[in-house]
Each structure stands twice: as C-alpha cells, then as structure tokens.
Amino acid sequence: MSPSDTTNAATREEWRDLGFFYDCDDVGQRWRLVGSRTGLREFPRLLRIYSSNPRNATASEHDHYGPYMYLKVMTWPDAGIDETSIHGTTDDLQRLAEIVDAALEQAAPGDAIAVAERFAPGSEYELVLEIKAEDFDPAEADPCLR
C-alpha cells in the first residue's frame, strides 16, 4: 500500500524544512547529504544546536533528523561515522560543523565532497556532501516520492 497524498506532501515539506536530502548507502558505506550550498548549511547548523545543548553532553544522547528520522547524531567518546550515526563528543560535532562549513565555502554545483577523513580518520562510513544548484528541491531526491 502506498502512502497517501497527504503523507507524501508532509514528507516533501519535511525535506524542504530540513534543507537537504540524505540517505545511507550501506553497500558503498557512505552517508550522502544532497542539497544546494544554502540547504546543506543546515547540517552544520543542526550540529551546532545539538552540541550546544547541555543535555547532549552525555554519551549515548542523540537526535534524529529528517522525515524518516534515520539520520542520527549521537554523543560518543570517539568521533566517527557508521551505519547508524554520526557521532563524537560535542566538541567533535562542533568541529564537524566547521569542517562542513569550510567545505561548502569552496563548493560549486556538481561537486561531491567527502569529509569523513577530516572529521574522523578511519571511520567505517564516509560522509559525502553532494552540491546541487540553489534551486534544488531536496524532496525531489527522495525515490519514495516519485
């Protein structure tokens, strides 16, 4: 049974509110964040909000993002990226926000920028920022909405 038109419309709006599309490619062992530079700037903003909340200072605290809620940012003693989360201390996550911001400064549509090595060398998964044009609609990247 397919989701209703109302559910699909709500999902589209959630992608737009998030600012970017994401998915986890387990075969390629990578998280893809897809959006315009403006939309992808929401990711470091989310990391800063998360890491500035004192409640998130304790290991295993986490938040989920996006319409399907499977993008998880988690507080953990070691920085890393795996199939379940992007994790580290709150200082690590602040540093990731800075890494992403710096990568986006130089980004142009068509670029795919891998940032895991700068954040957590040896991570199980890569984190790739796929840069689209400024008029990119993140909801259009969701294969479940086609």
Image: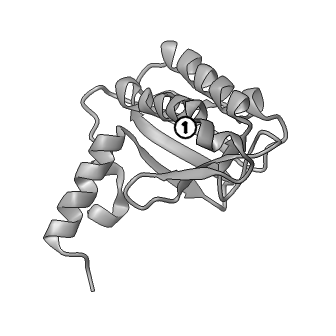
View extreme (bottom): residue: 1
- Can you tell which quarter of the image residue 87 is in? top right
Q: Residue at x 61, y 20 (%)?
A: 98
> Can you say whether 91 is above or below 75 in the image?
above
> Can you say whether 49 is above or below 146 in the image?
above
Left-right relation of 105 to 79? left
- The residue identified by callout 1 is 50
Left-right relation of 127 to 22? right
View extreme (left): residue: 5
> Can residue 111 be seen at all in this image of the molecule?
yes
Looking at numbered disc 1 in the image, what kind of residue is underneath it?
A: Tyr
- In this rendering, the count of numbered labels is 1
> Quarter holding the C terminus?
bottom left
Residue situated in front as seen by the camera: 90 or 96: 90
Secondary structure, mark 1, is helix
Dot 1: within a 10 Å radius of its alpha carbon, few (fewer than 14), some, or many (20 or more) residues?
A: many
Q: Residue at x 27, y 86 (%)?
A: 1
Residue situated in front as seen by the camera: 38 or 98: 98
Q: Residue at x 66, y 55 (%)?
A: 28
Residue 85 percent coordinates (x, y): 65, 52
> Can you say whether 18 is above or below 68 in the image?
above
